[in-house]
Image (cartoon, grey):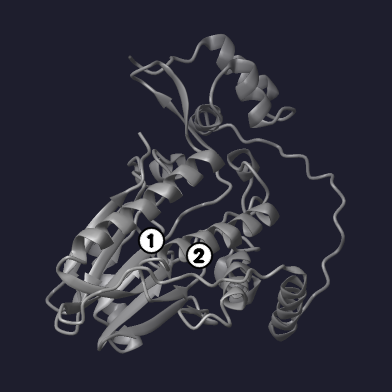
């Protein structure tokens, strides 16, 4: 079934009300999705005059050092008011020492807790919700169960005691970093932060049942930022930094879990002797394979070399090799048919995440594309 065509009266309604109604209200009146109305406004080249007559407190100018100090003080206050759990999780999986040791790696990015996504389904002729809080919770269970099942299968051949989880940003989504974004958000970022902390704790605790040790390496994304330009503010101002520092506090006394929170947007860590570079991926400009490959080659020279590059941001899971030197693991997202990815990159996303392994001889030995779709 073809998409619903726009009538002349609908177009006139948008033209007449673009300045005095929100996109949400227009979509409700027209019985259309937010994305459909927003796209039509843009296609008609209509400029909306957003009401700017709102009084805001005048910001106090602060130097970067003062901002970092203030951010850390806020984080400490959060620590003091958060009830820490007593985590004594038994390690129930006993691997044979005679089996070859393998190290598991789980890449997590672009979860976008709090996002709401709705698209037109041409098969049924109406809009469907493809992502919200309830769908996220179901996908989280799919991910945990998938990792546990794969671990069970591979443990017949390998000793799998160690897991590294790479948290590569866009775990939460600030609801005020660009105009009209509020209509794509189901809950404000303050609530998203608490959800992220609790669900990530739940994820780690669930996987501690089969892994003796878990390292979690954390870098921030661009949707957790507090300013429109993410590179103009300290990493500590990113909402995801608070999430990560809370995880660090939560597991501080747990000898089986190590949380690594660098004060930088990218970070290199080693598994065996392999160098893994993780970042969110928004520093890579454009979307063509050739252009990104050139940037990765330049990045390798600038940071001193690495064996595997991990990043997300583009909402599309894929793997490439840069000559015989670098494996590129581009991660997917958690949103099925994400409107943002379609508008920017002209493809619909599939919720997939990388889960793979390595050993001391090879940087990648096995790999699974975890499909998080619940239907």
Q: Where, by quadrant of the figure, is residue 273 drawn?
A: bottom left
Quick one: label 1, few (<14), some, or many (20+) residues within 10 Å?
many
Alpha carbons under labels 1 and 2: distance apart: 9 Å
Quick one: label 2, few (<14), some, or many (20+) residues within 10 Å?
many
Instruction: Please report the residue visible at 48 percent of the width from the left and 65 percent of the height from the top.
Output: 205
Please give the count of numbered marks on the rendered protein. 2
User: Which numbered dot is residue 312?
Assistant: 1
Return the disc, 1 or 2, that comes first in the chain's sequence. 2
Horizontally, is 43 left or right of 66 in the view?
A: left
Q: Nearer the viewer, residue 177 or 17?
A: 177
Q: Nearer the viewer, residue 236 or 301?
A: 236
Please say whether residue 70 is visible from this viewpoint. Answer: yes
What x and y, as percent, mark residue 340?
Answer: 46, 44
What x and y, as percent, mark residue 265?
Answer: 49, 75
Instruction: Please report the residue visible at 41 percent of the width from the left and 46 percent of the height from the top.
Output: 341
For the N terminus, which image quadrant? Answer: top left
What x and y, as percent, mark residue 239?
Answer: 63, 65
Instruction: Please report the residue visible at 82 percent of the width from the left and 67 percent of the height from the top.
Output: 59
Horizontally, is 25 left or right of 89 in the view?
A: right
The kind of secondary structure element at disc 1 is loop
Please say if 340 is above or below 289.
Answer: above
Q: Where, by quadrant of the figure, is residue 28 drawn?
A: top right
Horizontally, is 44 left or right of 69 in the view?
A: left
Marks 1 and 2: CB-CB under 8 Å?
yes
For the C terminus, which image quadrant? Answer: top left
The kind of secondary structure element at disc 2 is loop
Q: Which residue is mark 2?
A: 221
Q: Nearer the viewer, residue 35 or 132?
A: 132
């Amino acid at each position: 079934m073809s998409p619903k065509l726009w009538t002349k009266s609908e177009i006139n309604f948008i033209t007449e009300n673009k300045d005095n109604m929100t996109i949400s209200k227009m979509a409700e009146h027209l019985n259309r999705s937010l994305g459909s109305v927003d796209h039509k406004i843009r296609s008609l080249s209509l400029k909306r005059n957003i009401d700017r007559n709102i009084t805001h407190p005048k910001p106090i100018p602060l130097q970067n050092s003062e901002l970092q100090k203030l951010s850390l003080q806020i984080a400490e206050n959060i620590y003091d008011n958060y009830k820490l759990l007593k985590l004594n999780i038994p390690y129930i999986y006993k691997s044979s020492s005679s089996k070859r040791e393998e190290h598991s790696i789980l890449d997590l990015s672009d979860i976008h807790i709090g996002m709401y996504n709705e698209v037109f389904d041409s098969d049924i002729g109406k809009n469907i919700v493809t992502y919200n809080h309830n769908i996220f919770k179901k996908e989280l269970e799919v991910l945990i169960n998938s990792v546990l099942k794969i671990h069970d299968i591979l443990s017949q051949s390998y000793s799998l005691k160690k897991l590294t989880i790479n948290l590569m940003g866009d775990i939460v989504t600030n609801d005020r970093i660009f105009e009209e974004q509020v209509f794509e958000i189901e809950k404000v970022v303050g609530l998203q932060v608490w959800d992220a902390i609790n669900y990530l704790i739940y994820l780690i605790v669930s996987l501690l049942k089969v892994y003796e040790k878990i390292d979690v390496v954390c870098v921030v994304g661009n949707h957790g930022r507090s300013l429109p330009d993410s590179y103009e503010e300290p990493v500590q101002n990113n909402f995801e930094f608070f999430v990560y520092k809370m995880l660090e506090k939560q597991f501080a006394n747990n000898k089986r879990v190590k949380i690594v929170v660098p004060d930088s947007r990218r970070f290199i860590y080693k598994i065996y002797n392999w160098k893994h570079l993780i970042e969110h991926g928004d520093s890579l400009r454009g979307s063509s394979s050739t252009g990104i490959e050139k940037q990765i080659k330049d990045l390798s020279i600038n940071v001193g070399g690495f064996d595997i590059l991990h990043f997300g941001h583009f909402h599309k899971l894929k793997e490439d090799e840069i000559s015989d030197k670098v494996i590129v693991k581009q991660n997917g997202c958690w949103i099925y048919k994400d409107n943002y990815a379609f508008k920017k990159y002209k493809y619909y996303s599939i919720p997939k995440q990388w889960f793979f392994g390595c050993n001391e001889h090879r940087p990648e030995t096995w790999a699974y594309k975890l499909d998080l779709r619940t239907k």
